[in-house]
Image (cartoon, rainbow, N blue to C red):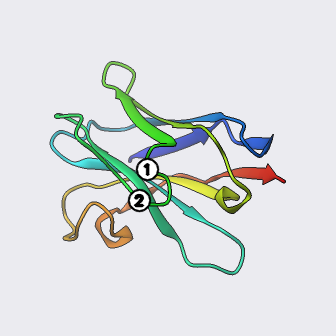
Amino acid sequence: QVQLVESGGGLVQTGGSLRLSCVASGRTFGAYPMGWFRQAPGKEREFVTAVYWNSGRSFYADSVKGRFTISRDVAKNTVYLQMNSLKPEDTAVYYCAATSGRRSGSYYSSNLYDYWGQGTQVTVSS
């Protein structure tokens, strides 16, 4: 059974930085992507970023491009999300997601992912 455990959330002022971590256990993810999504109160879950495990190729939502960086440590089976220049609109619960490859969909679609972490709260004060 795959488990994803996020950490690193918290309260930060506008312009500040946070680094989220997601430790995966139970399997490795080969050629598949791992992603970060977020959900703000009253809003739908939205794609933030994804990285393909083997190649390291990454993709970002326009809203975070240039501010957020996703990376992975293959040896530690861990994905990181470095968030800089944070804005109040970045406030949300952030979820790490992984796919078994059994589902279809694009890296930016939550439908692709069948494993989810419990989420970590990020709050950016103005």
Q: Give percent across and percent down for residue 108.
A: 33, 64
Q: Give percent across and percent down for residue 28.
A: 26, 36
Residue found at x 66% / y 69%: 40
Q: Give percent across and percent down for residue 79.
A: 42, 35
Q: Report helix, strand or loop for mark 1.
A: loop
Residue found at x 29% / y 55%: 99
| Front residue (pair 78, 18) | 18
Q: Amino acid at mark 2?
A: Ala
Residue found at x 62% / y 79%: 43
Give the class, few, some or many, for how many residues have Cα within 10 Å of label 2's Cα (few <14, many ≥20). Answer: some
Q: Is residue 103 above or below residue 30?
A: below
Q: Give percent across and percent down for residue 65.
A: 43, 50
Q: Provide the residue designation for mark 1.
A: 65
Q: Is residue 45 above or below residue 18?
A: below
Asked whether the beta carbons under mark 2 and mark 1 sit within 8 Å of each other, the answer is yes
Q: Provide the residue designation for mark 2.
A: 61
Q: Amino acid at mark 1?
A: Lys
Q: Is residue 73 above or below residue 26?
A: above
Q: Which mark is residue 124?
A: none
Res 78 quadrant in image: top left
Q: Left or right: where does residue 2 sit relative to residue 20?
A: left
CA separation, marks 2 and 1?
6 Å
- Quarter of the C terminus within the rendering: bottom right
Q: Report helix, strand or loop for mark 2.
A: loop
